[in-house]
């Protein structure tokens, strides 16, 4: 490989997409004939969200055209229908997914009939990327598209074939051995193995019980052939997912951090004075790492860099909302409610910019959600956190919060399409939180009781446990301890490991043990005795000093002074004795603020 070509491709591999695009376009007519250059060029434009420039490449090759159409259908349906399917007025993603899959099968049929034509890098890499998108869309549309099962099976078959082709070839490429392989072919192999790992990681994200050692195997092969920012980020993301599913996993935290640190070391070695990386996911994954090790300032700094990239983008992918969404969760956790609300709303703006029909009342709700079901959980979670943050921000201001759940209902109340139970549960939690925030415990209790009665056959055990734990909490606050105990036992029967239950029990027991416990009796004696000694000493001292001045008899004969001294002896003992009762009066607000327990995670 010529030195200039290697320098140019390194810009792509290290995430300097603007630099790569500039170099490519200086000699575009020649570069587009090189499959590797063309592939890197299209991927750079997509990462920079320069979608109109991407469309110009759509006529170069049939398979490339198919991939680009599929990308836009998944990432920005507005652009897809505005620019590529202008005559389609139905705005139905499911139907268009079927059309693209038919086109893909037709292309594959033509390929299979041409026995003399061997598929090379460009075809294989695009097939893998297409399989990745088809798999996720096929899984999301399985309730609405009769082709979903066929789509999923096809993606597995093709990905397995390509994996076997490159593994079984023992890294032979253009009849070379591993030792003699060219720099160009190393980059091609690196990209192939990265996409293989990415496909199986996508599968694992949908199938929680699916375990595949190939993910790490393929990613390590990718980095072995050519170090690159894409595999580094995906490796770190893979281990971050382990953290979010397994709780505090120090080993995974360290591994994810090591991959990022190693990449930054190689980056500084190769480009010591260059810090204008254009890869959004790089800053998102760094922010994630800092979140898990509780370094909020560094987390926000990296989200700030990600937001700078987003602000420069001429268009958006739906996935760009994740930056603002995760930042909003961190800010809410830190009680920065104004900033949090602003970022959740920015995430929602990006969502609607890609799916404008979601906000169009002229189209039936069922039709909208049938078309957008593969992103409904993102919309639902985003609206939930907007409402929750408003409640936290506007505590005690009844006018600010009384209609918040109605806003959510307007957006999320849809026909029966398989997601309604989840949405209803979220709405109930918001209504509960809203009524707690304004001190209406009776209404908060009634909201949960009514919901349990209406949905008792539809709720899973985890949700039932969470709801009964909240009921136990309410009854405890209003002093109905028998019912509180009864509801808590029911909650434990459903899910003894529920986080809300464990936190409630811990604080409830701490409260019960505090009143006339051994510790409290000790406090009572110590405070009373110490205060008596201190005040007695102070009184004797005052009597001596004032006596020397001839004023003691006049002052201490005053009944007001005498009563004040008497109270000064009694009050410390009184406060110590009744402190648990005073604490009980305020225990409700303190405990309820402590429990948020939404169960929702970062993206």
Image (cartoon, rainbow, N blue to C red):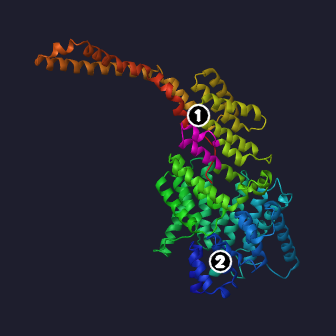
Residue at point 87% right, 76% down?
110
Label 2: element kind? helix
Query: Front-most of 168 and 131?
Result: 131
- How many numbered discs sit on the rendered protein? 2
Q: Main secondary structure of the magenta part?
A: helix
User: Residue beneath label 1, please?
Assistant: 436
Q: Is residue 472 magenta?
A: no
User: Residue beneath label 2, please?
Assistant: 41
**Picture coordinates of residue 408, whole percent (x, y):** 67, 45
Q: Quadrant of the C terminus?
A: bottom right
Q: Please tell me in which quadrant of the rendered image residue 95 appears.
A: bottom right
Q: Calculate the distance from the C-alpha at mark 2 to the C-alpha at mark 1.
A: 54 Å
**Mark 2 in CB contact with mark 1 (< 8 angstroms):** no
Q: Is residue 588 above or below residue 91?
A: above
The span picked out in magenta is: 383-404
Q: Is residue 338 above or below residue 233?
A: above
Q: Is residue 286 above or below residue 34?
A: above
Q: Please tell me in which quadrant of the rendered image residue 106 appears.
A: bottom right
Query: Front-most of 350 and 19?
Result: 350
Local crowd at mark 1 within 10 Å, few (<14), some, or many (≥20)?
Answer: many
Q: Please tell me in which quadrant of the rendered image residue 6 appears.
A: bottom right
**Picture coordinates of residue 369, whole percent (x, y):** 76, 53
Query: Front-most of 544 and 359?
Result: 359
Local crowd at mark 2 within 10 Å, few (<14), some, or many (≥20)?
Answer: many
Q: Is residue 402 magenta?
A: yes
Q: Is residue 395 above or below residue 29?
A: above
Q: Is residue 525 visible?
A: no
Q: Is residue 469 left or right of residue 109?
A: left
Q: Is residue 142 left or right of residue 498?
A: right
Residue 348: mark: none
**Picture coordinates of residue 252, whole percent (x, y):** 57, 54
């Amino acid at each position: 490989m010529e030195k200039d070509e290697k320098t140019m491709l390194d810009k792509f591999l290290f995430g300097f997409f603007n630099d790569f695009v500039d170099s490519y376009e200086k000699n575009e007519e020649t570069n587009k004939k090189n499959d590797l250059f063309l592939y890197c060029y299209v991927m750079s434009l997509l990462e920079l969200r320069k979608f109109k420039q991407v469309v110009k490449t759509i006529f170069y090759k049939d398979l490339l055209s198919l991939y680009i159409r599929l990308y836009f259908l998944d990432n920005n349906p507005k652009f897809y229908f505005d620019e590529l399917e202008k005559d389609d007025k139905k705005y139905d993603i499911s139907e268009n997914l079927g059309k693209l899959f038919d086109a893909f099968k037709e292309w594959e049929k033509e390929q299979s009939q041409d026995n003399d034509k061997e598929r090379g890098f460009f075809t294989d890499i695009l097939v893998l990327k297409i399989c990745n998108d088809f798999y996720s869309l096929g899984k999301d549309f399985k309730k609405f598209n009769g082709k979903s099962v066929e789509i999923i099976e096809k993606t597995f078959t093709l990905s397995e074939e390509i994996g076997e082709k490159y593994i079984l070839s023992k890294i032979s490429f253009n009849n070379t051995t591993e030792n003699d392989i060219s720099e160009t072919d190393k980059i091609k192999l690196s990209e192939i193995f990265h996409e293989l790992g990415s496909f199986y990681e996508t599968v694992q994200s949908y199938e929680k019980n699916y375990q595949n050692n190939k993910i790490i195997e393929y990613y390590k092969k990718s980095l072995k052939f050519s170090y690159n920012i894409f595999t580094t980020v995906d490796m770190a993301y893979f281990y971050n997912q382990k953290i979010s599913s397994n709780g505090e996993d120090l080993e995974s935290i360290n591994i994810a951090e090591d991959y990022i640190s190693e990449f930054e070391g190689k980056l500084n070695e190769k480009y010591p004075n260059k810090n204008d990386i254009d890869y959004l996911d790089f800053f998102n994954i760094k922010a994630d790492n800092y979140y898990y090790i509780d370094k909020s300032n560094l987390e926000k700094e990296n989200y700030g860099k990600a937001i700078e990239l987003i602000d420069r983008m001429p268009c958006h992918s739906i996935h760009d909302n994740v930056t603002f969404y995760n930042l909003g969760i961190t800010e809410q956790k830190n009680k920065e409610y104004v900033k949090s609300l602003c970022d959740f709303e920015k995430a929602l703006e990006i969502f609607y910019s890609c799916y404008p029909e979601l906000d169009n009342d002229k189209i039936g709700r069922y039709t909208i959600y049938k078309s957008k079901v593969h992103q409904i959980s993102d919309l639902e979670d985003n609206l939930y956190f907007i409402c929750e943050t408003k409640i936290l921000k506007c505590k005690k201001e009844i006018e600010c919060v009384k209609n918040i759940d109605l806003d959510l209902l307007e957006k999320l109340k849809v026909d029966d399409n398989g997601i309604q139970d989840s949405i209803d549960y979220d709405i109930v939690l918001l209504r509960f939180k809203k009524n707690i925030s304004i001190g209406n415990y009776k209404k908060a209790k009634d909201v949960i009781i009514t919901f349990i009665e209406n949905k008792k056959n539809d709720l899973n055990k985890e949700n039932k446990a969470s709801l009964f734990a909240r009921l136990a909490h309410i009854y405890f606050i209003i002093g109905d301890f028998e019912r509180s105990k009864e509801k808590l036992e029911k909650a434990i029967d459903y899910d003894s490991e529920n986080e809300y239950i464990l936190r409630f029990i811990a604080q409830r027991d701490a409260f019960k043990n505090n009143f006339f416990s051994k510790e409290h009796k000790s406090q009572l004696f110590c405070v009373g005795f110490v205060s008596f000694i201190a005040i007695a000493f102070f009184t004797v001292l005052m009597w001596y000093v004032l006596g020397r001045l001839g004023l003691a008899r006049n002052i201490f004969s005053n009944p007001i002074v005498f009563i004040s001294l008497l109270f000064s002896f009694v009050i410390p003992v009184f406060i110590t004795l009744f402190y648990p009762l005073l604490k009980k009066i305020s225990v409700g607000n303190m405990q309820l603020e402590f429990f948020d327990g939404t169960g929702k995670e970062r993206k």
